[in-house]
Amino acid sequence: MLFEEFGFDNRILKSMGHLGFDEATEIQARAIPEAMAGRDLLASSKTGSGKTLAYLLPALHRVYKKKALSKRDPRVVVLVPTRELAKQVFGQLRLLLAGSRFTSILIQGGENFNDQHKSLQKDPHFIVATPGRLVDHLKQRHVFLEGLELLILDEADRMLDLGFADAMRAINAAASHRQRQTLFFSATLDNTEVSVIAGELLREPSRVAVGQGFDEHTDISQHVLLCDHLDHKEALLKHLLLGQTIKQAIIFTATKSDTVRLSEIIAGWGLSTQALNGNLSQSARNKTMESFAKGQFDVLVSTDVASRGLDIASVSHVFNFDLPKQAEEFVHRTGRTGRAGFKGDAYSLVGPKDWVNFKAIEAFLQKTFTAESIEGLEPTFKGLLPPKPVRQETKKGNVKMPTKAPKKTNKKPAGKARFHDNQQDGFAAFKLPPKRFATSEVVSDEDE
Ligand code: ADP
Ligand code: MG
């Protein structure tokens, strides 16, 4: 579908012309007409498929064409989980609004609260925000949402993971008039938590899903390497980083301290690198992301603050130095490459401590990975055995015994992993190699 065919305001068509975009991506072709018809929407499609314009363009069209419900209140609020993504979406919105009389502001944690208050007093039409900080301003009565026309939640599932459910509810309650339209976007929306909050925030939503969260992303080549211990992981990473042409790479670690530690090691290999995590000051975070986006250094070592939404075309490689705890994050992390039709490579280093997460990722993706190995760096670790099948209660209450206990084997289990409900218990029986992995710190890296 061509952008001309949506019936967009001319200013939008002009912007698309400047960007050189004629044809809508599939999610845009399907979500934009629904949004323009005023319907609430749950929309999902793979990473890098153009979801941002799928919600920004109908928002712009509405503001350009329709009379505001209120003269003072913001007309559109876009909520996103991280400051980095907020900045990116805000940048895109600003470009689209350039030359128009409509104004937008960015409200996120880590920036000066009073400055934000002053910006809010200018009655902007659009706000791009992280949820916690917007709620702080609502509480202070710096902003009112009675006139809000469109509430957009990008990466809605991640906002829930980060504990923003109450903030989302508070924003919803502040804008709970009948005319409001609400849109949820993400690559992964199929989970119970999302359904619950969607039930509260959306009214009879249309569901637009282009593929499923677990569908294979054909522009991303996935590679899995098994590793014995931390030194082995580092040796593999060194080989992979130095042994191939990498435009830019993002390396994800489990902990904030590991971003710094690993970045220092990588610098020792002669690569230009910086660490990004939620412990850095906001100005340091901004500087790091800006210079990475400009290509001023090659390797960004980050926690999951960079897993969602960031769109940097020259990221050719993603490395999971540690696997994410939540299987969805695997999709989002690796989705930082292979965007907008470009090809990318994603490498996941799987040690004994990653094994449970690895099997959960395979189960989520409904896929079995075949591990690759590098000559001279082959692992002795071949994976952990699945836990012994437990006695299962049948419907009639009889106890069903497993027909055969699984044989001890060094082979990776095929198909879906058989997990107990409590995966930790299931694996506790297996001895881990004595070498310690550096993953003890709190994993979450929250923004407010
Ligand atoms: P998603 O949110 O689905 O991960 P983004 O909205 O970040 O994806 O878009 C990914 C990239 O695709 C961006 O660089 C964006 O400019 C580009 N893009 C978006 N729509 C189009 C289009 N219709 N044609 C070509 N490129 C597009
Ligand atoms: Mg996005």
Image: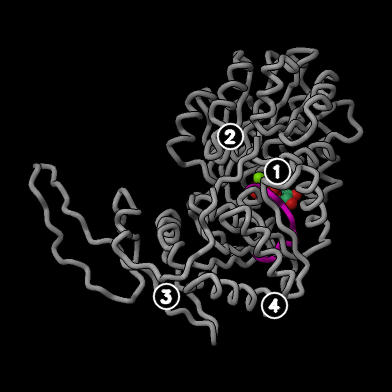
Decide if ligand 2 comes within 8 Å of the CB at mark 1: yes
The secondary structure that most of the magenta stretch takes on is loop
SS for dot 4: helix
Secondary element under disc 1, as helix, strand or loop, is: helix
Q: What residue is shown at x 85% (from left), y 26% (from top)?
A: 102
Q: Is residue 261 magenta?
A: no
Quadrant assignment for the N terminus:
top right
Q: Answer above or below: position of 270 versus 157.
A: below
Identify the residue position indicated by label 2 in the image.
Answer: 184
Q: Position of residue 338 (x, y in %)?
A: 65, 61
- Please give the label number shown on residue 85: 1
Disc 1/disc 4 C-alpha distance (Å): 29 Å
Which of the 4 quarters of the picture holds residue 268? bottom right
Q: Amino acid at mark 1?
A: Leu
In 3D space, how far apart are the residues under numbered discs 4 and 3 (Cα atoms)? Answer: 24 Å
* Between discs 1 and 3, the one toward the N terminus: 1
Specify the amino acid type for callout 3.
Phe
Residue nearest the viewer, comparing 18 with 193: 193
For badge 4, the amino acid type reads: Leu
Residue at 13% of width from left, 63% of height from top? 403
Magenta stretch, residue numbers: 308-317
